[in-house]
Image: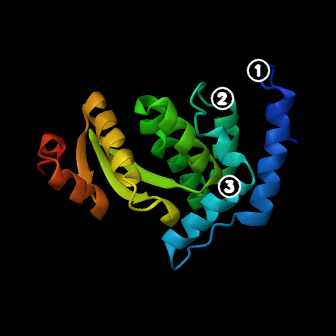
Amino acid sequence: MTDWLHWPFLEDRHRDLYQRVCDWCGDNADDSHPDDVDAACRALVASLGRAGLLKLCVADGDSIPDVRSLAITRALLASRSGLADFAFAMQGLGSGAISLFGSTAQKAEWLPKVASGEAIAAYALHAGKIIFTHTEVPSAYGGRGIGSALVRFALASARTRGLKVVPVCPFVAAYIEKHPEEQDLLDPT
């Protein structure tokens, strides 16, 4: 065990988490460069969800994640696999719009799915822009307007934060095209 795990602001639960993440990394994480990055990322998200680790980065609707747990987990994941760290971080960031702007019913329905790895939403931030790279809803829930709700909440978050939108994801681009009231968010460059 490393010396920093005994610092006074870390608790036994953090030391236990350190070991859990180390064990997960030993079984699941390597720094290979897969041919199909999307499939590898989906597999990592599913594995992180099964291990209960995504619950650390997704708000439960009533409280925010513990920063110490996030720091330990991200440091370990990044040291073993950049893609695993990315998958973990994106689940937390991707669920932020629902955590901040979702109704109680939406939080109850979607935050557990994101925390389990069943639903995925991804974006990146760069120089005052939010780049929507991917939106995914489980196929069993397709056609119910759930993807549109995710995008609507994400755009509301972008507007509140003063960010311009770059819709790389075809679903996000189509949503904005169908909703003229959102088109002022588009990055002009």
x 76%, y 20%: residue? 9
Identify the residue under disc 2.
66
SS for callout 2: loop
Q: Nearer the viewer, mark 2 or mark 1?
A: 2
**Residue 41 against residue 21 in the figure, above or below:** below
Circle 1 packing at 10 Å, graded few (<14), some (14-19), many (20+), is few
Q: Are marks 1 and 3 in contact (CB under 8 Å)?
A: no
Task: Where is residue 1? Give x, y as percent.
Answer: 88, 42
**Could you tell me which secondary element the residue under label 1 belongs to?**
loop
| Residue at x-position 13% and y-position 51% | 189
Q: Distance of mark 3 from mark 2, alpha carbons?
A: 17 Å
Labels 2 & 1 near each other (Cβ < 8 A)? no
The residue mark sitting in front, 1 or 3, is 3
Mark seen at residue 48: 3
Q: Give the amino acid type for the residue marked by disc 3 in the picture.
A: Leu
Percent from the top left, x then y, of residue 124?
Answer: 38, 49
Residue type at mark 2 is Asp
Q: Which residue is mark 1?
A: 9
Q: Quadrant of residue 14?
A: top right
Q: Is residue 65 left or right of residue 17?
A: left
In this rendering, would 30 be left or right of 164?
right
Q: In the current view of this chain or complex, which residue is farthest to the front?
A: 144
